């Protein structure tokens, strides 16, 4: 059993399953967010009442089985924000995993345990989920590579859903080489050698981020521009990043309510206040608001399709700031969540692939440094080219 030095793994569980010998990922270890089924072990979903209310699975989730078949060893199940309804990574049931890159700050959620385990070198890679930013945000906060694949590209069998029109499976790694190996297996295709030839810099997203974040990302952005060649600036969201955020904040909670309403009605489970409040708000969204949000989703998809023809990548900050401090009062957390969502909403709205790349840091007033990620997006189905770009960017240092 790996010593859990950062509270990344679900307390009281011991999961160790060897991968297939001689697979392409042999020698690597991985962890699975506790939304993924592992045969013979409860799927906790970050809520103890959920684990008690649902049967123990008798088969592995697709993502778990795929990594095992490729030779990677499963070493544990990781803590998640409650039923994946969180973005900061603080769990009322299992505690907050430690962000080893910034110990007094949150790891980001809801794939908090998976990110914390990889950042602390407790495993080589880990799978998480991304609905509204739950891989991209912890990747930025913990200084990791993280991917949100094209929506609908990967099977979600055996993964606890939240909002199906936005749900994806993603993964983390500390280095680009491991990230590329895992991505090739998960995406089912080799990482290409051809790189994009055009770069779009999302000036509204950089303007929305804290000035210190934009400055810290500039060297990485300049290297990306030199690698790609043609560079131009444009707007990601002409209607406004906050408008896209509002649309995702309308659609996602309504779907989450529909996902969990029968469980809530039947079991009256214990829920953290913020989670309960979000579900209640989702239940009360009128059809007129949902209709508007669906139209905005169509606009967002059309905008990204126009911005990202084949051979083009778009660059933007993954998060508007580095990881916030742990234990903030709810009144301080909510504005933070809103700002994060403004830079993450396009993922659930449009479903285009996105990779968060580490490599930028800000000074921490308390000492040390705080990581922030640079994200690249590409056309639907261009996931592997994003991975190739991240790999080329690391090797160009």
Image (cartoon, rainbow, N blue to C red):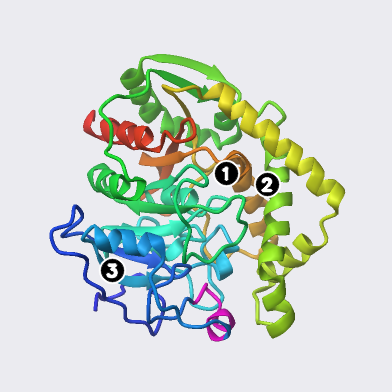
Horizontal arrangement in the rendering, residue 366 relative to residue 82 (left or right): left
Q: Which stretch is magenta?
A: 44-52
Q: Are marks 1 and 2 in contact (CB under 8 Å)?
A: yes
CA distance separating discs 1 and 2 = 9 Å
Disc 1 target residue: 344
As drawn, 122 above or below 243: below
Residue 224, quarter of picture: top left
Horizontal arrangement in the rendering, residue 10 relative to residue 52 (left or right): left
CA distance separating discs 3 and 2 = 33 Å
The quadrant in which the C terminus is found is: top left
Q: Residue at x 33, y 31 (%)?
A: 389
Disc 2 target residue: 248
As drawn, 321 above or below 307: below
Horizontal arrangement in the rendering, residue 240 relative to residue 167 (left or right): right
Pointer 2 local density, CA inside 10 Å: few below 14, some 14–19, many at least 20: many
Pointer 3 local density, CA inside 10 Å: few below 14, some 14–19, many at least 20: many
Disc 3 target residue: 74
């Amino acid at each position: 059993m790996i010593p859990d030095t950062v509270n990344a793994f679900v307390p009281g569980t011991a999961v160790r399953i060897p991968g297939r010998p001689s697979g392409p990922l042999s020698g690597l270890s991985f962890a699975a967010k506790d939304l993924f089924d592992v045969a013979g072990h409860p799927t906790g979903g970050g809520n103890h009442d959920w684990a008690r209310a649902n049967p123990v699975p008798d088969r592995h989730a697709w993502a778990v089985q795929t990594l095992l078949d490729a030779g990677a060893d499963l070493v544990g199940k990781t803590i998640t924000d409650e039923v994946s309804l969180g973005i900061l990574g603080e769990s009322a049931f299992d505690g907050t995993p430690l962000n080893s890159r910034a110990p007094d700050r949150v790891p980001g959620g809801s794939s908090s345990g998976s990110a914390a385990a990889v950042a602390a070198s407790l495993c080589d890679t880990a799978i998480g989920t991304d609905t509204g930013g739950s891989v991209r945000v912890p990747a930025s906060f913990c200084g990791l590579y993280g991917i949100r694949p094209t929506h609908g590209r990967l099977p979600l069998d055996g993964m606890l859903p939240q909002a199906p029109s936005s749900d994806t499976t993603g993964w983390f790694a500390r280095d680009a080489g491991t990230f590329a190996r895992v991505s090739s297996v998960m995406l089912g295709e080799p990482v290409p050698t051809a790189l994009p030839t055009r770069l779009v810099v999302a000036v509204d997203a950089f303007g929305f981020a804290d000035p210190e974040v934009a400055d810290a990302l500039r060297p990485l952005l300049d290297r990306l521009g030199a690698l790609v060649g043609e560079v131009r600036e444009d707007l990601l969201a002409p209607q406004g990043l906050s408008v896209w955020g509002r649309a995702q904040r309308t659609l996602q909670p309504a779907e989450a309510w529909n996902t969990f309403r029968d469980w809530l009605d039947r079991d009256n489970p214990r829920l953290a206040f913020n989670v309960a409040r979000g579900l209640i708000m989702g239940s009360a969204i009128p059809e007129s608001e949902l209709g508007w949000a669906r139209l905005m989703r169509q606009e967002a998809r059309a905008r990204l399709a126009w911005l990202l023809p084949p051979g083009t990548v778009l660059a933007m900050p993954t998060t508007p700031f580095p990881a916030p401090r742990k234990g903030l009062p709810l009144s301080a957390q909510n504005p933070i969540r809103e700002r994060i969502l403004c830079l993450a909403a396009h993922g659930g709205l449009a479903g285009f692939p996105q990779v968060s790349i580490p490599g930028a840091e800000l000074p921490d007033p308390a000492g040390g440094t705080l990581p922030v990620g640079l994200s690249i997006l590409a056309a639907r189905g261009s996931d592997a080219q994003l991975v190739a770009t991240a790999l080329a960017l690391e090797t160009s240092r």
